Each structure stands twice: as C-alpha cells, then as structure tokens.
Image (cartoon, rainbow, N blue to C red):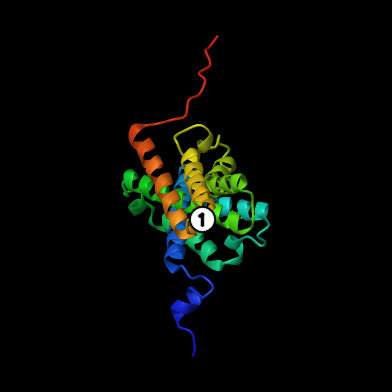
C-alpha cells in the first residue's frame, strides 16, 4: 500500500508523533525569537535567516557533534531546517503582525521550548551511553546553545550568562529527567517530569524576577 502524505512526513521510525510535533513547534518559536533579534540588530533577510537557524538548531547541532551523532539530526532531517527557516521567513514577511504578539505569550512559549529541548537533549545523550552528569550538561546545551550562538553572532554577551534563571532551569529539568531514568522510571515519564520542572522554574523566575547572584564592582 502506498504510504499517505502523513506517513511520509512522520515515518514509522518516529513512534512519538506528538513529541516530534512539539519539538518542531519549539524549533519554530526559537526561530521566531532569533529573527526578531535579527530585526532589532538591523540584519538583512539573509542574516535574519542565518540567525533564525542558529537560534533554533544550534544547540542540538553542537550536542550531536559532541556525542558523536553524525550527521546532526537537525541537518539530516529536512523538517527541522524547514521549520527554522519558515519561522525566520514568517517574521520577515509578517513582522507588523508578529510584533503584536504579547511578550508574556512569547516568554511562555520560550519556556516550553526550553523545557522540551533540555529533556530531549539529555535523553538523546543517555541513548548514546553518555555519562549521566555529562548527559545533564548536553541537555542544558541543547536548550541554551542556540541563544548563545545567536548572541555571539550579534557580538553580545550571551544572555544566559548574565540574566534570568534560564540555563539553570534547563539544567534542573535535564537533571530531573536523568535521575528519574536512573531510578528505572520510564523515559517518557521522566521526560515529562523534567520538562515540567524546567518550565515551572522558568515561569516562577520570570514572575518573581529571580536572577543568580553576582558581584557588583565598585567604581573607583
């Protein structure tokens, strides 16, 4: 029997279609955020698309290179690149409408994408037999790596190093997920638990304006 269009887009090797759709949704949201940053930096359309791709997929590409998943899934699977470029193109074409989206909604979607990428990154590292501690770090990198690459491309100090509870939220979610897996809890349940912890911590930090402590240098 000839496969349907839906089966071509979501082949049998990916059993969790819901997770894939959510993953692509997170990719789209991060791409939109990258494009919005590119517009504020007055980039042209090519630069905007490059920043969109880097923001959405940079963390996953670095993770795959570090754990030996070659070629990186974001490059091997056309759906990820297409989603990232679509997010950037949507911002370029419909910027007057997109900038009307409430910032609170964008922050909520960003937190959801961060949670998903953090636990998915840690889960993939565990699948490649990476040490649990390093799996947590790989999950964190997956969540925050794209934004870090974006800031470096725009010659800015990466936001995750100086503001908000962002990388810490990703690390917490990845840690919860890895610990749960090591306690013989099913991977799906562990990912849900880790994702909820990451999302909740990020949203609470935003609501209460939490930041990590830092030294304030006195001016001479």
Q: Which residue is mark 1?
A: 184
The answer to whether residue 15 is seen in the rendering is yes
Image coords of residue 114 (percent x, y): 46, 48
Q: Is residue 67 left or right of residue 151?
A: right
Mark 1 falls on what kind of element? loop
Res 89 seen here: no
Q: Quadrant of residue 64?
A: bottom right
Callout 1: 10 Å neighbours few (<14), some, many (20+)? few
Query: What is the quadrant of residue 204 in the picture?
Result: top left
Is 31 in front, or is 136? 136
Point out the image quarter for the C terminus.
Answer: top right
Residue drawn at (51%, 45%), measured in percent from left and top? 175
The residue that appears at 52% across and 13% down in the rendered structure is 218
Give the x, y percent position of residue 164: 44, 34
In the displayed image of the protein, which residue is found farthest to the top?
Answer: 220
- Residue 94 placement (x, y as % from top left): 38, 56
Residue pictured at 55% horizontal, 41% vertical? 151
Residue 10 on image: x %, y %: 48, 73
Task: Locate residue 95 relative to residue 147 in the image: left or right.
Answer: left
Seen from this angle, which residue lies furthest bottom? Answer: 1
């Amino acid at each position: 029997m000839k496969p349907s269009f839906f089966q071509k887009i979501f082949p049998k090797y990916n059993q969790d279609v819901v997770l894939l759709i959510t993953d692509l949704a997170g990719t789209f949201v991060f791409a939109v955020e990258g494009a919005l940053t590119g517009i504020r930096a007055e980039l042209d359309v090519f630069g905007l698309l490059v920043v969109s791709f880097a923001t959405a997929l940079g963390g996953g590409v670095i993770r795959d290179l570090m754990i030996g998943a070659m070629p990186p899934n974001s490059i091997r699977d056309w759906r990820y690149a297409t989603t990232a470029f679509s997010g950037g193109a949507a911002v370029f074409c419909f910027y007057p409408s997109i900038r009307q989206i409430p910032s609170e909604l964008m922050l909520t979607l960003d937190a959801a994408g961060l949670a998903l990428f953090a636990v998915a990154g840690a889960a993939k590292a565990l699948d490649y037999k990476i040490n649990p501690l390093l799996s947590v770090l790989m999950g964190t990198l997956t969540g925050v790596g794209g934004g870090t690459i974006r800031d470096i491309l725009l010659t800015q100090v990466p936001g995750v190093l100086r503001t908000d509870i962002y990388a810490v939220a990703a690390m917490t979610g990845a840690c919860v997920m890895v610990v749960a897996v090591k306690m013989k809890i099913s991977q799906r349940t562990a990912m849900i638990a880790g994702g909820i912890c990451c999302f909740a911590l990020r949203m609470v930090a935003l609501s209460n304006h939490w930041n990590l402590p830092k030294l304030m240098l006195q001016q001479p």
